[in-house]
Image (cartoon, helix red, strand yellow):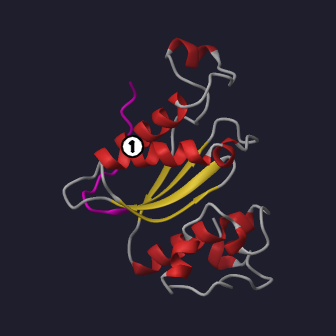
């Protein structure tokens, strides 16, 4: 098994991008109930704070704060992916490598992580998460996307309901 060099900081805040293997698939939103159940199952055993999150058809972005004594986000992602995959019928195409390793063909093997450096970095990643459905052309207003923590931010009074409803939401503050 490959041993990836990943920074592991207990109690740190992390931004993640996790993709389906088939980037044209709408599976994550089609099976949002199963995805939520996978998250609940894993987070019951391995708690953390989900600061912000968005689920799109073929990928998701999440901002997590890990417990003060725990830096193991990889186990959580592996278990979330596995729980979601096990809940689905086996319909996906698999290449020889995945078959030989006993893997499903649902998720990309890796994920992208970035440790949040400061409050500005945190705010930019929260904004990036919440604007992502607009960026991908799924909705014209961020609040119209159902699978986002933006609804929680609005309910808590952190942002207004019309946040990012201006015509130029693809500006530099929301870049990759």
**Where does the magenta region start and end?**
1-13
For the point 50% across and 85% down, the residue is: 158
Estimate the x, y position of residue 33 in percent, counting from the top left. Answer: 57, 46
Label 1 crowding class (10 Å Cα cut-off): few <14, some 14-19, many 20+? some
Observer-nearest of 64 and 33: 33
Disc 1 is placed on an element classified as: helix
For the point 48% across and 45% down, the residue is: 37
In this rendering, is residue 124 above or below 38? Answer: below
Estimate the x, y position of residue 24 in percent, counting from the top left. Answer: 76, 41
In this rendering, is residue 148 above or below 143? Answer: above
Q: Could you tell me if residue 78 is visible in this image?
A: yes
Question: Predominant secondary structure in magenta?
Answer: loop
Please give the residue where the numbered disc 1 appears in the rendered image.
Answer: 41
Estimate the x, y position of residue 120 in percent, counting from the top left. Answer: 46, 80
Please tell me whether residue 8 belongs to the stretch shown in magenta.
yes
Please tell me whether residue 138 belongs to the stretch shown in magenta.
no
Q: Could you tell me if residue 6 is visible in this image?
A: no
For the point 74% across and 68% down, the residue is: 134
């Amino acid at each position: 098994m490959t041993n990836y060099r990943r920074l592991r900081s207990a109690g740190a805040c992390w931004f993640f991008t996790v993709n389906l293997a088939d980037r044209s698939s709408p599976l994550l939103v089609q099976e949002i109930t199963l995805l939520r159940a996978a998250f609940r199952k894993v987070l019951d055993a391995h708690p953390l704070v989900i600061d912000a999150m968005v689920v799109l058809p073929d990928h998701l972005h999440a901002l997590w704060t890990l417990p003060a004594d725990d830096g193991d986000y990889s186990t959580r992602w592996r278990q979330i992916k596995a729980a979601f995959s096990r809940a689905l019928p086996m319909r996906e195409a698999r290449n020889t490598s995945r078959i030989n390793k006993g893997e499903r063909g649902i998720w990309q093997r890796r994920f992208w992580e970035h440790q949040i450096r400061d409050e500005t970095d945190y705010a930019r990643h929260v904004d990036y998460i919440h604007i992502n459905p607009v960026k991908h052309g799924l909705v014209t207003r961020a609040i119209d996307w159902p699978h986002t923590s933006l609804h929680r931010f609005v309910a808590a009074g952190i942002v207004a309901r019309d946040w990012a409803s201006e015509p130029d939401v693809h500006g530099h503050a929301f870049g990759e």
